[in-house]
Image (spheres, rainbow, N blue to C red):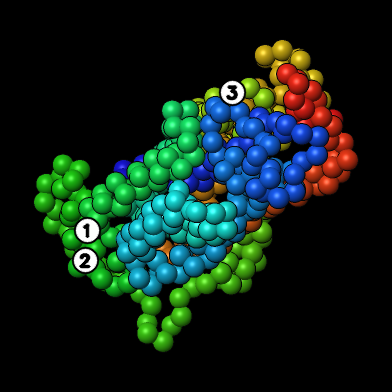
Amino acid sequence: MIVSYFKVYVACQSMLIVLVGAAPDYHVDQEEIPVSRAELAKHIHFANNFTSIVTEWYLIEQEAYKVGLASSLFFAGLLIGNITFGPLSDKLGRKPVYISGLFFDVIFGYVTALAPNYDIFAVSRFFVGIVNGGMALVSFVLTQEYVGKSFWSFTGSLTNLTFAVGIAVYALLGYYVREWRYLALVSNTPGVIFFLLSFMLPESPRWLYSQGKTAEAEHVLQYIALGNGKEQLNLKLKPSAGTLRKDESAPGILNLVKHPVLRWRTVILMYIWYVCSFVYYGLTLNAGELRGNLYLNVALYGLVEVPAFPLCMFFIEKSWSGRRRTMTSFLVFAGFACIFTLFLPTSAGLFFSPTLLALCGKMMVSAAFNIVYIYTSELYPTVLSRRREVAAEDLSHRHRVGGSLQRSRQLSKSFLVHRRNAHLYCPIWQADKPIYSNF
């Protein structure tokens, strides 16, 4: 349960830039926008309902791209973390890699909150992404390896559900903590609690067994049984037939493409992970740009995922639907929901508004995302349980690439819009002061 609830902390770190990088309303009390930052500070006036890195470092106009850049660096770090933490957890064990990553995640999280300038802030987000992405992968594998195969769908759904709840929790924190540095500190503090609690976790019994450490695996299984209220078990594991010899190399990503069946299966799953990530993060990170209350929008984009998980649990266990049909249906519904938002006017009413349809699309793609996590871990049966992590690791790379490209797309859009509209900034006078706006 500790590893599952840890996703609340992961969600706060993933969504940090949505509120910390939000741009409040502002106006400049002269016709020409000053070029130097010192001069700009004298003439710009931000709305005082909250602070962000935009208000502290004046990331507006030609500097606005830096908000998206910091987010892109975070997702680039996630990709690197997925690549490095998977092999490390194979060699060193799940628990030490998970705890070490969590320690550095907390450290870099505090560096983010205390960053004296934008450069340190951006670099810290990159390193937070590395350890955050690596831990997310290792924690998911660790959760699945604690339980039997019959519980994989439940633990996988519970882990992803807590991430959705974490988005709503972060929105609630942002509503009450309007100073961005305090918000970053408060959002990072749960990591300290999870770090201390994580020392109570046992090592993965499956990993111990795959390494030939049968006695330690038996001890962990006894510990889990006693924690579940079971009596002392007379447990004796057979030596693992899949234990690697010293002259053998561990299975790598190439094992996923050597066999024709696995190769085709991997290609399809790579594309599904990419699509789910691109749509999921496109909708989630766009919550801060919608009309209306910023904090309510972020909370809704988290809470709308909650109904998706009971739907997943219901349909994927039915013989007439299963994993594949259910995932396909959710992806189709998510696609149509996102497409129809292009054709609905903003004044179409509550039940036909683009925002409501986008929320429905978010719920559908969240359900598909949840299933593909579970489905991937079940599609690679092998004597070596480590091969399933190799599959999850490789496909998780595609998931991070999709998220990184989504942020890069938004970053390019922000930069191009500024360049295209640079000559359209005109002063709108109000209360004898010009308020700059673009048409």
Q: Looking at the image, which is closer to me, 261 or 434?
A: 434
Q: Residues within 10 Å of mark 2 (few under 14, many from 20)?
A: some
Task: In the displayed orientation, state which residue is furthest to the top.
Answer: 349
Q: CA distance from mark 1 to mark 3?
A: 48 Å
Residue displayed at 49% across by 39% down: 180
| The quadrant where residue 341 appears | top right
| Picture quadrant where residue 138 is located | bottom left
Residue drawn at (32%, 72%) of the image: 211
Query: Can you give x and y, in whole percent of width and height, for residue 338 in the image?
Result: 72, 32
Question: What mark, if any, has residue 220 been given in the picture?
Answer: 1
Please indicate, yes or no, whether residue 260 appears anywhere in the rendered image: yes
Total labels: the figure holds 3
Q: Nearer the viewer, mark 2 or mark 3?
A: 3
Question: Marks 2 and 1: CB-CB under 8 Å?
Answer: yes
**Front residue (pair 221, 260):** 221
* N-term mark: 1 or 3: 1
**In this rendering, is residue 217 above or below 245?**
above
Judge left or right: residue 161 versus residue 266: left
Residue beneath disc 2: 216
- Residue corresponding to mark 3: 293
Label 1 CA crowd tier, 10 Å (few <14, some 14–19, many 20+): many
Residue at 42% across, 69% down = 88
Q: Residue at x 34, y 66 (%)?
A: 93
Name the amino acid type tagged 2.
Answer: Glu
Residue 190: where, in percent of width, then height?
35, 43
**Please, which residue is most extreme toward the left here?**
232
Secondary structure under tag 3 reads: loop
